[in-house]
């Protein structure tokens, strides 16, 4: 299926790793141009170098918790590549974990800042040009945790639930301008984020990583019917469709890529 992405310009945040990286690669393969953003200039350069064989990609380092850097990102991307038609907001962290009574306000601020406010800032910076063009696609990466909170990571869960609400609201606000806004909700995808979780678990239980993955699914994610970690390219495929020319009537929705982890249909 031709996704109609040739020549479109996409900004991908959290782009040098995991889901963001694979999404950038997928969009390049579809003929889109990509402005890749992440925090660490060296890691970003390495990612751009790898992606260059797939198409026109340039790196733009920014810490998205700093609104000045988000504004600078918008200016620089606009000057060097043009105004993005597509924004995929994949920057995120697991952040502090632990039960509610073990976490303090700073723990909450940190996770909400990185997982929710970075997406908000990027939307604020990049939607105005989409409105002028009367075409745009915005995708936030939420999580199964948004609708199925796990009690030892409530800040993460709440930050992802906030993204669902924001995307629904923005889809209503900007639908008349030809802009769609959606979320993708993955669960347990094989990226550095869950590598770190599994390394911690393997160390705690004195087992290897494969065993840690297996017992995590058995004990913590019993509803996952696909008994393995998801692959970042499986998430990238869903995102590529949502930002495509063919997804014109799909907005304000959430597309789960979670191996069945969320236990309800809606
Ligand atoms: P990852 O750690 O591989 O990638 C996250 C990227 O975000 C990193 O490259 C990191 O540098 C970047 N980032 C963090 N803070 C930033 C900041 N302040 N400014 C700019 N960039 C920043 O993780 P991933 O698994 O690819 O996660 C991508 C997104 O998907 C995240 O939002 C995550 O919460 C979400 N998600 C992941 C999973 C999973 O199982 N891996 C499941 C559900 C949702």
Image (tube, rainbow, N blue to C red):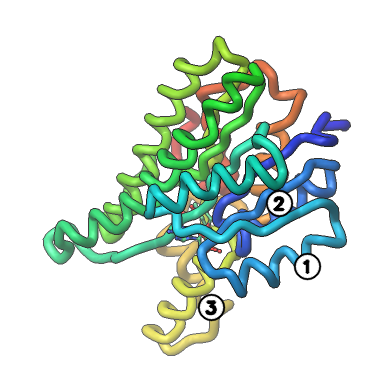
- Which residue is drawn at the image coordinates 48% and 80% (left, top)? 199
Q: Nearer the viewer, mark 1 or mark 3?
A: 1
Secondary structure at badge 2 equals helix
* 1 or 3: tag closer to the N-terminus: 1
The local crowd at label 3, few if under 14, some if 14 to 19, many if 20 or more residues have their Cα within 10 Å, is some
- Which residue is drawn at the image coordinates 41% and 39% (left, top)? 120
Relative to 145, residue 248 above or below: above
- Distance from mark 3 CB to nearest ligand 1 atom below 8 Å: no
Q: Position of residue 12 (x, y in %)?
A: 62, 48
Relative to 69, residue 170 above or below: above
Q: List the residue tagged with mark 2.
A: 24
* Quadrant of image for the N terminus: top right
- Which residue is drawn at the image coordinates 51% and 58% (left, top)? 62
* 2 or 3: tag closer to the N-terminus: 2
Q: Position of residue 234 (x, y in %)?
A: 69, 50
Q: List the residue tagged with mark 3.
A: 211
The local crowd at label 1, few if under 14, some if 14 to 19, many if 20 or more residues have their Cα within 10 Å, is some
Secondary structure at badge 3 equals helix
Query: Are dots 1 and 3 in contact, CB under 8 Å?
Result: no
């Amino acid at each position: 299926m031709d996704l109609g992405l040739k020549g479109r310009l996409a900004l991908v945040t959290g782009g040098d790793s995991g889901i963001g990286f694979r999404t950038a690669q997928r969009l390049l393969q579809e003929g889109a141009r990509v402005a890749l953003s992440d925090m660490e200039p060296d890691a970003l350069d390495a990612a751009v170098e790898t992606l260059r064989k797939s198409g026109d990609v340039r790196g733009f380092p920014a810490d998205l918790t700093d609104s000045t850097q988000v504004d600078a990102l918008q200016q620089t991307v606009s000057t060097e590549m043009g105004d993005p038609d597509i924004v995929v907001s994949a920057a995120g962290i697991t952040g502090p974990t632990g039960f509610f009574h073990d976490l303090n306000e700073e723990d909450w601020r940190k996770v909400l800042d990185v997982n929710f406010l970075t997406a908000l800032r990027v939307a604020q910076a990049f939607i105005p040009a989409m409105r002028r063009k009367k075409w745009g696609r915005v995708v936030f990466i939420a999580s199964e945790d948004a609708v199925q909170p796990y009690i030892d990571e409530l800040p993460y869960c709440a930050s992802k639930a906030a993204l669902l609400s924001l995307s629904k609201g923005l889809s209503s606000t900007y639908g008349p301008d030809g802009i769609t806004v959606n979320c993708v909700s993955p669960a347990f995808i094989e990226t550095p984020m869950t590598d770190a979780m599994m390394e911690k678990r393997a160390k705690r239980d004195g087992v290897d990583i494969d065993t840690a993955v297996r017992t995590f699914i058995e004990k913590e994610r019993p509803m996952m019917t696909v008994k393995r970690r998801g692959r970042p390219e499986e998430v990238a495929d869903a995102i590529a469709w949502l930002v495509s020319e063919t997804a014109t009537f799909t907005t304000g929705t959430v597309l789960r890529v979670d191996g069945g982890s969320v236990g309800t249909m809606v």
